[in-house]
């Protein structure tokens, strides 16, 4: 099976053109979990299958590295968009069909990739005893929790992941689990963000939907305005949005 390895700010993926059903006789969950394992196999945070290209709509199927199928992936969608464009399958503007809906994709003149998301309503949970933090929740294709901390780049990864798992596996609030973002407010419209990803089950170098969730929740609290620069371990992402009566 031919594959392409790509990354968005260190958030890395394996992409397979599956339009002729190369994987039809393979147990996909086991296959994905195997090839995504680092050190012993190719290694990746996720695996994407190109399933269909029709009338300007490209179908993307996304799997987390643990073999579970995910609804959507922001950085994955950016890599996927670049992949289909570089292979001559689309024009510079097209749509990506995912389990969580259709997203717009644009290959910019400088060859960066912009993904357009639909509108979202911010929901705030009351405080509860998870590391004594006020947490905020929003679904941006996939579920995300955001909480705020100071000097986050110096927090030990093991300690962060330990605390993040307490939220990620809180079945009472999040029966389907959630991604967890630790956010630090910086001067101007800038955030530092670290994301523990559901399905990868560890901190990743970057997370596109995590950057969006962190930006929208920060904006809803009056802390930033669009555009927001989100700095992650693997690099920077730019999040642009409009706000109308609490909907972003």
Image (cartoon, helix red, strand yellow):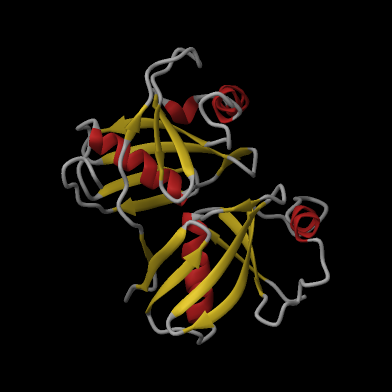
Q: Is residue 244 left or right of residue 30?
A: left
Q: Where is residue 76? Give x, y as percent.
A: 53, 60
* Up/down of 39 relative to 181, above or below: below
Residue 100 or residue 39, whichever sits in front: 100
Task: Name, please, the residue furthest toward the left.
Answer: 245
Farthest residue in the bottom direction? 88
The quadrant the N terminus occupies is bottom right
Q: Residue at x 71, y 47 (%)?
A: 66
Residue 32 is drawn in which quadrant?
Answer: bottom right
Number of disc labels:
0
Whole-percent x, y for residue 85 in the image? 48, 80
Compare residues 66 and 232 and report the one nearer the observer: 66
Residue 17 on image: x %, y %: 65, 76
Horizontal side, residue 128 vs residue 124: left or right = right
Q: Going by the image, does 167 lie left or right of 183?
A: right
Q: Quadrant of residue 213?
A: top left
Q: Is residue 181 above or below residue 106?
A: above
Identify the image quadrant of residue 197.
top right
Q: Is residue 81 left or right of residue 138?
A: right
Identify the residue at image location x=59%, y=40%.
198
Nearest the eye: 7 or 134? 134
Against 90, residue 79 (above or below) is above
x and y percentages locating residue 156 in the rendered image: 57, 25
Residue occupying the point 29% across, 33% down:
186
Q: Residue at the spot x=57%, y=30% of the render?
A: 168
């Amino acid at each position: 099976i031919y594959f392409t390895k790509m990354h968005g700010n260190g958030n890395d993926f394996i992409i397979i053109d599956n339009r002729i059903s190369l994987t039809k006789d393979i147990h996909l969950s086991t296959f994905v979990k195997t090839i995504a394992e680092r050190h012993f196999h190719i290694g990746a945070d996720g695996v994407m299958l190109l399933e269909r290209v029709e009338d300007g709509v490209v179908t993307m199927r996304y799997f987390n590295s643990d073999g579970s199928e995910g609804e959507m992936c922001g950085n994955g969608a950016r890599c996927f968009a670049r992949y289909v464009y570089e292979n001559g399958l689309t024009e510079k503007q097209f749509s990506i069909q995912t389990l969580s809906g259709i997203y717009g994709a644009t290959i910019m003149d400088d060859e960066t990739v912009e993904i357009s998301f639909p509108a979202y309503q911010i929901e705030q949970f009351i405080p509860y005893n998870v590391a004594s933090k006020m947490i905020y929740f929003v679904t941006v294709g996939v579920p995300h929790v955001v909480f705020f901390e100071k000097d986050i780049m110096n927090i030990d990864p093991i300690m962060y992941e330990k605390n993040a798992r307490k939220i990620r596996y809180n079945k009472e609030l999040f029966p389907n689990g959630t991604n967890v973002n630790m956010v630090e407010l910086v001067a101007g419209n800038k955030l530092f963000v670290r994301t523990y990803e559901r399905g990868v089950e560890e901190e990743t170098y970057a997370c596109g939907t995590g950057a969006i969730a962190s930006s929208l929740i920060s904006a809803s609290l009056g802390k930033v305005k669009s555009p927001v620069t989100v700095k992650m371990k693997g690099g920077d992402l730019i999040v642009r949005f409009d706000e109308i009566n609490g909907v972003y």
